[in-house]
Image (cartoon, rainbow, N blue to C red):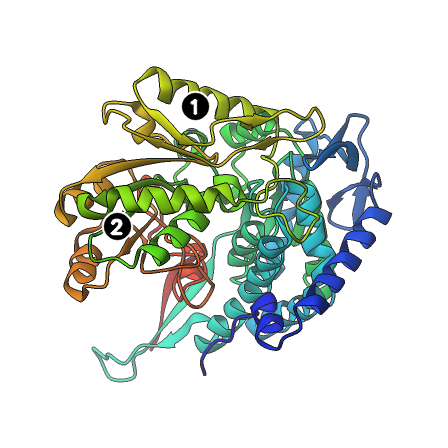
Amino acid sequence: MPFLNERTFQRYLQEGKEEEFHKLFDEGIKRVEEKLGLEYPILLADKEIKTTTKRVVKSPIDTSLTLGVFQEDNGQLLEEAIKVAKESFSYWKDSDWRDRVEFAIKAANEMRRMKYELAATITFENGKNRFEAIAEVDETIDYLNYYAQILEENRGYVKEMEGRIVRGEKGVSVMRPYGAWLIISPFNFPLAITATMTLGALMTGNTVVVKPSSDTPLSAYKLVSILRKAGFPSDVVNYLTVPGEVVSMVIERNLDMAGFAFTGSREVGHTLLKKFINLKPRPAVMELGGKNATVITAKADLRKAVEGTYRAAFGFGGQKCSATSRVFVESPVFKEFLSILKARIEATAIGDPRLKSTFLGPLINKSAVDKFRRFVDQAQSEGGKILIGGRVREDSRTYLVEPTVVVDLPYTSSLWKIELFVPIILVKEISNLKEGIKLANDIDYGLTAGIFSNDEDEIEEFFREIEAGVVYANRESGSTTGAMPGVQPFGGWKDSGWTGKNAGGPYYLLSFLREQARTIY
């Protein structure tokens, strides 16, 4: 049975009900506004805990708005939560996989009921426009339903072996969970990425402690609340707000953690992993960013190439690990591509993401704006030219910057190699596809990549030679972005990933399991 994705806005669009979609989203905004400033506890088993130290989280779309007040643990509760998760593993590991499937489907249905409030929460929390916010909720629902389907198709990962050495021998392969997992999620997909890592562990019989980004703790709180309401036991799925540096210290000394899942920067991920396995070899699931390239050949449809590159580079301000940050364009179409791209960027609506007309909202915080300024200055000081953009929209209550295109930047610049995570792309002229592939691969990362060409042989060569876990050809909706659960399994090669089993794909759940061979005589 083929998997069906949620695709909310696309369905409304196809049915000619776009205004109804906007009406529902605006109602979601009102529901979130009614709850601004509430205090949220730590969820540890059946206890709701408040600490003496608080973290007041502001909205990046207007820093005068308090999204919520959250607890700040000093590490003591994190240690306790890991202990609770370890103890609850003693019964959860033997839970019926059919129950886990049922709970996931119930959670998907509850999330569907809350869809517009959840999407509006994301808009307030990290500044995504309504189209990307609703897409993230859809992605989360897809993860719930897809992993339920995969678990059901594999009958809980119990497989009778066909081979026999002696008469009466019966062998069975059983995939078994590890124990308590720490889930460390990022700000850019506070619902979907938190969900895929949490579900990867929960659906396979592990227990979890969810630690969200300090910038975006509310979506994760709502996710954990929904999972508990759907039937996942409270001591099996715990929620904790704690500073990153405290997490690092606990990882360095805690032996009760069976594994951890992390999405974030390569530097942080590698540091955590070294501390974790130095104490005791254990599994980790990590997605560690990208430096994604789009290659445009002389045989490309330039209208598609521009639109796909624009959306992949500047959607959510480039704050996606899959965002296009390097563009390699063949000489015959180089100038024309830049001309069309510049015109497309000039039409960008930058501003308050609560408005349906807005494409680009704010960056996540002041540090991101400072980084944007620093990269623009570096590009110019090293000989690069700003084709368009490069400026910060001065406003003390938000973090708006302009989509930026840099040309003529010497290839010796470190900007060609490091992940930027802001709306800046570097564009370079190339002589042929072979050169484009070579440059695209000339990095430590290998997450996503895209090509625009109407030549099937060029596309095949690109797919065969490119070193990336997710690749697209002629994708107008985003040349390197927008992977869908059950359609494009999402994960990276090289320094971009760790397990080689991509989220939203048929093998992802196996990252949280180990095999036990059982034989009866």
473 displayed left or right of 88: left
Front one among 418 and 71: 418
- In x, y percent, where is residue 380? 37, 19
* Secondary-structure class at tag 1: helix
- Name the residue: 53% across, 44% down: 348
Q: Nearer the viewer, residue 271 or 503?
A: 503
Residue 296: numbered disc: 2
**Quadrant assignment, res 401:** top right
- Residue located at (59% from left, 63% from top): 138
The residue that appears at 60% across and 50% down in the rendered structure is 208
Residue marked by disc 1: 376
CA separation, marks 1 and 2?
24 Å
The earlier-in-sequence mark between 1 and 2 is: 2
Q: How many marks are shown on the rendered structure? A: 2
Crowding near the residue tagged with mark 1, few <14, some 14–19, many ≥20 C-alpha atoms within 10 Å: many
Residue 516 numbered mark, or none: none
Residue type marked 1: Val
Residue in front for this viewpoint, 369 or 261: 369
- Left or right: where 231 falls relative to 1: right
Asked if 388 appears above or below 219 in the picture, the reply is above
Position of residue 360 measured from the top left corner of the image (x, y, whole percent):
57, 43
Q: Position of residue 446 (x, y in %)?
A: 30, 44
Q: Are marks 1 and 2 in contact (CB under 8 Å)?
A: no
Q: Secondary structure at mark 2?
A: strand
Query: From the viewer's perspective, is residue 269 above or below residue 34?
Result: above
